[in-house]
């Protein structure tokens, strides 16, 4: 999910999702200034919109404060209340909010939007989303947004993944940027120094899918079209997870399970020069600059795997993040006006550049990140962004992949058996 892509990855990977709990939305029994007793907007009066989003950067509130200030200045009859909702417990919070009568008018969502759309909790935006508007996006993005012929969200951000590397360590070991899997292994082995320096890190569940993709497999069956079945119980999928697992167990070039108790500790190891290469979403660039301003780092595309399809050889987790309107919202027109404002390139840039993301509008990215070495690499990665078909079971899929990866990394199961058990587990729950 483009936090998580998110994502894009893609993932990109691409967080990249929705939460529940206390809502600051309007109530039909408690009208606000500019609303009648039923909570509907009164012409010429100010209405209040609620907007929920999980954070991608530490300065989330500050970034949105500037955007909202500009929006309210141009739309004095609309007030926007922003609530930053944590990623932990996201699904539970949003599910509870949308099950009640006061969900946020506007919410940021990634793959999980399908569940809410199919349950009738999101407004159909088809009439707002004109054919001219649709033509601005790639067909794959429009397909991603469309559920049963209707459009329920509008794209806001796009993210992809790259391999970050420590330039000083590469120079010290005289390592060239790896272009293939074999070269990646050799680089990782050279960078590994006992007892606590590792060649490569952040071999997480989302990247496990990416490596299986680089070998030629797909997350879902029928070339990602059949979301009722997982698609990586194939020779290609097994080869991908085997290579991924070998980095930990065979080559001992990546931290074993439990070496770092949290992803934050692993990130800190990269800041401290204890990890030579780190797989991560490109937005991590801004995190490095904040936490390790003196670190000399760069990025490169995923080294090419053995997939027969050249477009998949450098597959990366990628994704897009979207904005939705609650079906229960009494201010859909005003909410759409806010979404249009936020996604306009000149305004979206106010969030995307500081947060390290791109726009799903290809043309909007040309003027962004001028002279930024890492983002130039990401621009190449995002051109071939592969989006996993969104569906209401994505959370279940991710949990199963996490278990599959852990079993392989601990040596409890072979990669082949871990994959077969994962597929069986998913089918038993479908």
Image (cartoon, rainbow, N blue to C red):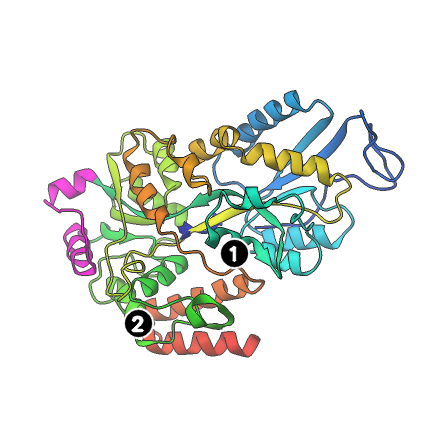
Quadrant of the image occupied by residue 40: top right
Q: Name the residue: 67% across, 55% down.
A: 95
Q: Name the residue: 56% across, 42% down.
A: 132
Residue 137 on the magenta span: no
Q: Name the residue: 89% across, 37% down.
A: 37
Left or right: 83, with 260 as reference point = right
Left or right: 354, with 311 as reference point = right
Q: Earlier in the sequence, mark 1 or mark 2?
A: 1
Image coordinates of residue 203 in percent, x first then y, are 33, 57
> Is residue 169 or residue 27 the one in the foreground?
27
Q: Secondary structure at mark 2?
A: helix
Image coordinates of residue 262 in percent, x first then y, are 41, 51
Q: Is residue 340 above or below residue 309?
A: above
Q: Which mark is drawn over residue 143?
A: 1
> Is residue 224 or residue 191 the one in the foreground?
224
Q: Which mark is drawn over residue 236?
A: 2
Range of magenta residues: 167-193
Q: Which mark is drawn over residue 293?
A: none
Left or right: 304, with 356 as reference point = left
> Is residue 355 or residue 310 the one in the foreground?
310
Crowd band around label 1 with a 10 angstrom C-alpha radius: few (<14), some (14–19), many (20+):
some
């Amino acid at each position: 999910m483009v936090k998580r892509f998110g994502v894009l990855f893609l993932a990109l990977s691409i967080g990249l999702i929705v939460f529940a709990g206390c809502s600051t939305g309007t109530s039909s029994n408690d009208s606000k200034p500019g609303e009648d007793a039923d909570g509907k907007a009164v012409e010429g009066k100010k209405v209040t919109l609620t907007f929920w989003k999980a954070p991608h950067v530490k300065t989330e509130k500050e970034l949105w404060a500037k955007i909202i200030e500009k929006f309210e200045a141009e739309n004095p009859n609309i007030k926007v209340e922003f609530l930053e909702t944590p990623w932990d417990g996201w699904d539970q919070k949003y599910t509870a909010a949308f099950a009640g009568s006061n969900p946020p008018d506007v919410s940021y969502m990634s793959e999980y939007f399908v569940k809410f759309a199919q349950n009738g909790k999101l407004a159909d935006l088809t009439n707002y989303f004109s054919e001219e508007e649709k033509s601005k996006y790639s067909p794959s993005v429009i397909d991603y947004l469309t559920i049963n012929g209707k459009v329920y969200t509008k794209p806001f951000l796009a993210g992809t993944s790259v391999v970050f590397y420590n330039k000083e360590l590469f120079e010290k070991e005289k390592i060239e940027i790896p272009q293939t899997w074999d070269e990646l292994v050799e680089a990782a082995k050279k960078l590994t120094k006992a007892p606590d320096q590792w060649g490569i890190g952040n071999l997480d569940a989302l990247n496990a899918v990416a490596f299986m993709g680089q070998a030629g497999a797909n997350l879902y069956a029928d070339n990602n079209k059949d979301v009722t079945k997982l698609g990586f119980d194939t020779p290609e999928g097994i080869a991908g997870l085997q290579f991924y697992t070998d980095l930990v167990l065979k080559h001992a070039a990546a931290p074993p399970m439990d070496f770092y108790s949290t992803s934050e500790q692993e990130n800190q190891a990269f800041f401290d020069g204890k990890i030579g290469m780190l797989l991560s979403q490109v937005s991590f660039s801004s995190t490095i600059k904040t936490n390790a301003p003196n670190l000399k780092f760069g990025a490169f595309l995923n080294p090419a795997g053995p997939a027969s399809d050249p477009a998949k050889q450098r597959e990366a987790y990628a994704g897009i993040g979207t904005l939705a309107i609650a079906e229960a919202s009494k201010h859909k027109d005003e909410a759409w006006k806010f979404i249009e404002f936020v996604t306009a390139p000149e305004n979206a840039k106010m969030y995307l550049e500081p947060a390290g993301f791109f726009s799903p509008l290809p043309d909007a990215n040309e003027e962004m990140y001028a002279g930024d070495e890492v983002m130039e690499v990401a621009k190449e990665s995002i051109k071939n962004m592969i989006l996993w078909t969104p569906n209401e079971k994505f959370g279940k899929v991710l949990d199963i992949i996490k278990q599959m990866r852990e079993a392989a990394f601990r040596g409890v199961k072979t990669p082949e058996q871990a994959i077969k058990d994962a597929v069986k587990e998913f089918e038993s729950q479908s």
